[in-house]
Image: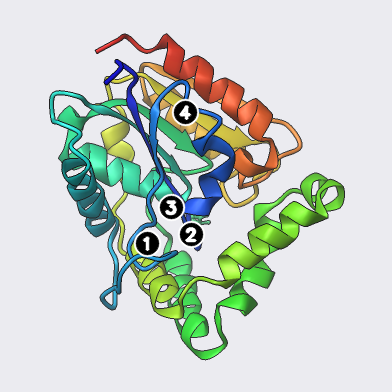
Amino acid sequence: MTDLPTLLLIHGFPHDHTLWDPQVTALSDSAHVLAPDLRGFGTSGPVPEVMTMEAYAEDLKKLLDERGVPPSEPVVLCGLSMGGYVALAFLERWPERVKALVLCNTRSGADTEEGRAARQETARNAKEKGVPVIARAMLPKVLSEHTRTTDPELSASMEAMMARQRPEAVAAAALGMARRPDRTALLSTITVPTLIITGAEDELMPLPTSEAMHQAIAQSELVVIPNVAHLSNVEDPVRFNATLRNFLSSLPHA
Ligand code: MLT
């Protein structure tokens, strides 16, 4: 074993582990990279009616134990969007297992009443209309116009990645997100180095959301990637990876 940290990459909604393809190999010189499917997504197992952020976090804790990552070696947790919600749920419960935090295109707050109603509709639509309909509607929100016009192949592969997720997994995640608590109060308790990355064009998580997290987390750095919307790690992997590699190399060794 080298003294490289473990980097646990947590995908968003409705994604699978392939969201992190541009990072897994590229960052393998800087960390032991783990990029699992959250339960229900990709090739992972069946889900209950509702998957809370806490349940995903518990799965990840089990995964670390199964992979032999000992409690004495805290990990770098990196979550994008829903993955960020899961990262905060993990940190709240197992702060001692977290060496550093990377919050990408995410927020700490809970859903509004209106947002919760929209989640119910998403859950219903996933089962009644099918996930491809949701994927098609989400695409212009998750990729910037710049990305969609300059990289139609990436647009097609991101739509396909979202479209192939199972309706039960999508519904369970939507209902779980609706139930997540506001974790803003947690932010001021975070003492580990934290990197916040977002896209200048992200309308799902507008910039003030990331700026507020940056204000609240003492040891945090905010990086805003231009021309990029919600999927910053795939829209500009060169910039994203350089930022993350830099952050990893700044962390104290175990
Ligand atoms: C995601 O990308 O994970 C979702 O946009 C998160 C959300 O719907 O709140």
Judge depth for marks 1 and 3 and give the one in front. 3
**Does the closest atom of ligand 1 sit within 8 Å of the Cβ of label 2?**
yes
Q: Residue 58 placed where, x, y %? A: 20, 52
What amino acid is found at the position of numbered circle 3 in the picture?
Met
Alpha carbon of mark 2 to alpha carbon of mark 1: how far?
A: 10 Å
Judge depth for marks 1 and 4 and give the one in front. 4
Q: Tag 2, which secondary structure?
A: loop
Q: Are marks 4 and 2 in contact (CB under 8 Å)?
A: no
User: Sequence-wise, which precedes: disc 1 or disc 4?
Assistant: 4
What amino acid is found at the position of numbered circle 4 in the picture?
Ser
In this rendering, position of residue 134 left or right of residue 118: right
| Residue tagged 4 | 28
Q: Residue 77 placed where, x, y %? A: 35, 34
User: Sequence-wise, which precedes: disc 4 or disc 2?
Assistant: 2
Alpha carbon of mark 4 to alpha carbon of mark 3: how far?
A: 24 Å
What amino acid is found at the position of numbered circle 1 in the picture?
Met
**Does the closest atom of ligand 1 sit within 8 Å of the Cβ of label 1?**
yes
Q: Tag 4, which secondary structure?
A: loop
In this rendering, position of residue 184 left or right of residue 55: right
Q: Which mark is residue 177?
A: 1
Residue nearer the viewer, 50 or 65: 65
Alpha carbon of mark 1 to alpha carbon of mark 4: how far?
A: 31 Å
| Residue tagged 3 | 82
